[in-house]
Image: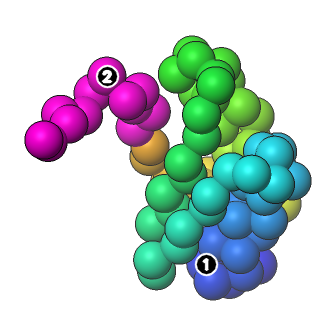
Amino acid sequence: MTIEEATEFFGSMLRETFSPETDILRLGRTFTVMISGHSPAAITTDLEQIRTSVEGHLSVPLNVSYRVMSLDDFERTP
């Protein structure tokens, strides 16, 4: 599996894991997932499961990094 195929596969796993209302944006190898109504801890667990699933199809570990933030991590502007 090429890195592009792995990236596509990772994106498809994201789409299967989260509800259709979830916005998933891709820019190159970077995904931004906009999720509401879930705790950062639950999202982190889901992302770890996705990474493990994708790595099962690769000969080398997938170098995935992510940061889960809540709305409280952002500053609202007036």
What is the span of residues highlighted in magenta in the rendered image? 67-78
Report x, y in % for residue 69: 39, 31
Local crowd size for mark 1, using a 10 Å CA cut-off: few (<14), some (14–19), many (≥20):
few
Report x, y in % for residue 52: 74, 40
Residue at horizontal 54%, vertical 68%? 25
The label on residue 3 is 1
Report x, y in % for residue 75: 18, 34
Describe the colour scheme in one phrase: rainbow
Above or below, 77 against 57 in this view is above
Q: What is the spatial separation of the Cα atoms under label 2 and label 1, in whole angstroms?
A: 34 Å
The magenta stretch spans residue 68: yes
Residue at horizontal 45%, vertical 33%? 68
Residue at horizontal 14%, vertical 42%? 77
What's the magenta bit mostly, secondary-structure-wise?
loop
Q: Secondary structure at mark 2?
A: helix
Local crowd size for mark 2, using a 10 Å CA cut-off: few (<14), some (14–19), many (≥20):
few
Amino acid tagged 2: Asp
The magenta stretch spans residue 26: no
Residue mark closest to the camera, 2 vs 1? 2
Q: Nearer the viewer, residue 67 or 62?
A: 67
The label on residue 72 is 2
Mark positioned earlier in the residue sequence (2 or 1): 1
Amino acid tagged 1: Ile
- Which image quarter: residue 45? top right
Quadrant where the image shows the C terminus = top left
Note whether residue 46 is visible.
Answer: yes
- Which image quarter: residue 8? bottom right
